[in-house]
Structures are given as structure tokens and as C-alpha cells.
Image (spheres, rainbow, N blue to C red):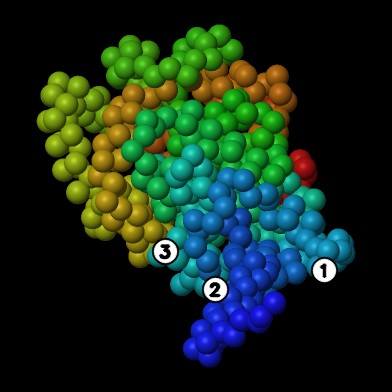
Amino acid sequence: MASTVLPPAFTASLASRCASVRQLSASARSAIQPRRTPPIRLVTAALGGGPGDIGAGGNLGAPVPVASLSSPSPSRVRPAFALASEATEGGAAATSGAAKATRVEVPTETDARGLTRMVLQEEGYEQWEWQGNKVNYVVAGDVSSDATPVLFIHGFGASVYHWRYNIPELAASGRPVYAIDLIGFGWSDRALIQYSAAMWADQISSFVRDVIGRPAVLVGNSVGGYVTLTTAANYPDTVAGTVLVNAAGKFDESPPGTAPLSGADESPSESKGRKRAGAIPVETHGHQHGQEEKVPISVLVREKVQEAVEGVVAGVGKIARRVVLQVTFLQAKQPGRIKQVLELVYPNAASVDEELVRSIVLPTRDPNAAEVYYRLSTQVLLHPSALSLNALLSSLRSLDSPMLLLWGALDPWMTPAKAQTIVDNYPGAMRVDIAAGHCPHDEDPKAFNEALIKWLQSSF
């Protein structure tokens, strides 16, 4: 058979094509080889002195640049202490010593009074995702400690920064410490949703399960105190104990334990129908002891102002109501106005410093801030939950959960009479009065921290 001689030009072209195929094959093999990914920061954050990371080999704790928070859903990330205890290096289980290296430090500074406090970070702190919303929180202390964790919950208009003097001190006592911004406040998202204490209780219980990973002691100020009780009543498996700091909420006049456990809201007219003329239910518990408590004039004035506002707002149309509240918001977010309001409830006005005012002003720059203010005003402030403090405390009595009241005795809004009514409805509660106003944790942090740490050490 005669051999076929290929033209030189064709041979050269074929060789070139073969070389190209070999090169493409090599490139393809290289492309499918496993590649080491750069370290990414955990959203649960801070597994050491700086941001934790999981890099090649699975090592934890080396500080790295913060990666995008759009990586895996934080709601499914296990607590930092759990991740630390399961850390591996080269496929081997981490030693107990490595698991214990989980102390988290927050940046601190010394104020003009010589007190240590958390630094105000204008961009917020750590982030966790809940139901598609960004939630801001702080974590500090030894998150692998066996000590019962503490979770601070702020009041209306405040944020995690309101616990600036308490977080470092509690963390130094050797326990895990957390603080969270409720949805709609602080650096958490201004979500366009229906707001209620029940919704915030859902948020808190999810945070305890997903981030903390075990039951915590909830410490709530003002509205945060009411949310604390609501969470404990609705999700008792997530709450080890409760601390009420001048807690908001109302009492009805039925005997303790008889109020229905309903999550429905009541209208302003229904709310006013539950009040006696010229007084506030939460301040008039004297009928239980055969005598009547006197209501401070400042509280009566506030009550009358609130009723007047409710009447005006209820009497105008929806559009006009929105205009009125948005104008109110524009006034309320001014630094000078914020300072004035704070000084009403801080007898020691020196505690109302520039950083505190700024921590309230900064979040109001959110594009949704005005709309959320409208929703909070109409859905929460003017339509309080029908779930009274009587009902919440009644449901908690069967759980026999430890409770502490740290009460600012000089509060013109939530007077000591209210604290006593809570104790009357929850006999196992311990009460400590502090010579401060509505926010004793910030106005007299030394007395507050000492009392809280002492109670925690004796109760858990």
C-alpha cells in the first residue's frame, strides 16, 4: 500500500493544533484543582482579640480584613464558642486549650469621670442576619466560659451603645456578654414591617439560639424591659433569668394572673378605658394594700400630654397623621432636642454627654428612619400591647425564674411604685434601688454594675 505524503504546510498546521489542544487540556486540569480560599470573617465574630477567620486548614482567630457580610446566612452560623470548640487543624480536633482561647475584647476608652466605657463606632459593631434584616450586636468576654451569658436590650430610641459602661465591666467578670439592637433601632435595619413587642421577642429568642447558643440572662431597660418579659413568657427555653431596669409596660386592675395572655393590640380608647381618671395604672397599686399611692405631678403631666397627642393623632386622617409624626421626627432627631429629652430623665445631667447624644443621632440618618418612626409611633407607642405586665408576670411565676429589678429611684416616668408593683406580682424578685433616673445603668454605672454582678454570681 503506497504511503501518503502530507504537504509540509498541512503537517505544520496539525502540529500547531495538537499543541493548542495539549495546552487547553492542561489549563482545564488546573482549573478543576481545589483552590485555597482566603480567610473570611465569621459574622458571629471575634474569636479572639480580633476578628476570627476560617482560612486554609481551618485555623481560627488570626485577624484578617473584614470580608463581605453577604457570605453564608449568619442565621445559620453556629455560636462562636461552638465553632471554637470544633476548630480543626489539618483535620485533627482542636485541643481544649485552643477552644478556650475565645476571649473577645471591645475597644474601650476612659471618660472625663475616669470610667471605662465602650468606644462609639459610627459604622456599628457586629452583624447578624434575621429574617432578611441586618441586626447589629456587640459581643465581649470569654464566649467559651461556662458562666451564664448576659444579653443587654436597650430602650426606645437607644442602641447597644447605651450599655457602654456595662459591657466592658461585665465582660471583665469572666462571663460572655452580648448587647443587641432591636430591629428599627440603633444600627439594625429600619425594616418596613409591623412592629410589636412580640416581633422583638421573636428576634431576641432567635439571637439567643443562633448566636449565643444557650439560655441567657436578659437585661432590659424601659421598652427593652417589656421585651425581656415578653421573651421570657413566650420563649422560656431561651431565658435563664431576667433583669428589669425601669421597665416599660402597663398593669391592668384585675387581680394578678387573671389577664388573658393575648398578643393582640388594643386601641387608644380601650387603653384609656382601663385607666382611672387622672392617674396611671402602673403607678396605683395601693388598692392591694388598702391605700392609694400618690402619683408624681410629672407623671400626671406626661399622661395628659400623651392623651392629648393620642386625641389629636386619632382625630386626623392617615395622611395628616403621617405629616404630623414626620414633622415630629425631624424635630426629635435634632441633637439639641435629644439632649433636652435625656436631661429630663437623667437627674445628673453631666451623664448626658456628646457621645451619648451622637449615638442616638447617627442611626436617624437611615433613609427609612422617618417611615419607621411613624410605624413605631402608630403601632407601638399609641397602640400598646394588650398583654399587661400582670399577665406576663403571672405566666413567669410558674417557671420560678430568677428576677432582679435594678431601679432608678429618681425616674419621673417609671417611679419606684411601679417597681414595687412588679415585686408584688412576682414575689421571688429582688429589688435594688439606685439613686438615678430612667437609665441607672448609664447614669450610675458603678452602682449598677456592682449590684448586677453580685446578683449574677449568687444566682447562677
Examine the rendering and report whether any part of residue 342 can be seen: yes
Instruction: Choose mark 3 or mark 2, whichever is in front.
Output: 2
Disc 3 target residue: 123
Residue 229 left/right relative to 1: left
The amino acid on which the numbered mark 3 sits, given as a three-letter code, is: Glu
18 vs 51, nearest the viewer: 18
104 vs 393, nearest the viewer: 104
12 in relation to 406, above or below = below
Gap in angstroms between the C-alphas marked 3 and 2? 16 Å
Q: Name the residue rendered at 49%, 28% in the picture.
A: 198
Disc 1 target residue: 90
434 in relation to 69, above or below = above
**Secondary structure under the numbered disc 3 in the rendered image:** loop
Name the N-terminal-most of marks 1 and 2.
2
User: Which residue is outermost to the front?
Assistant: 1
Disc 2 target residue: 65
Quadrant containing the N terminus in the rendered view: bottom right
Gap in angstroms between the C-alphas marked 1 and 2? 23 Å
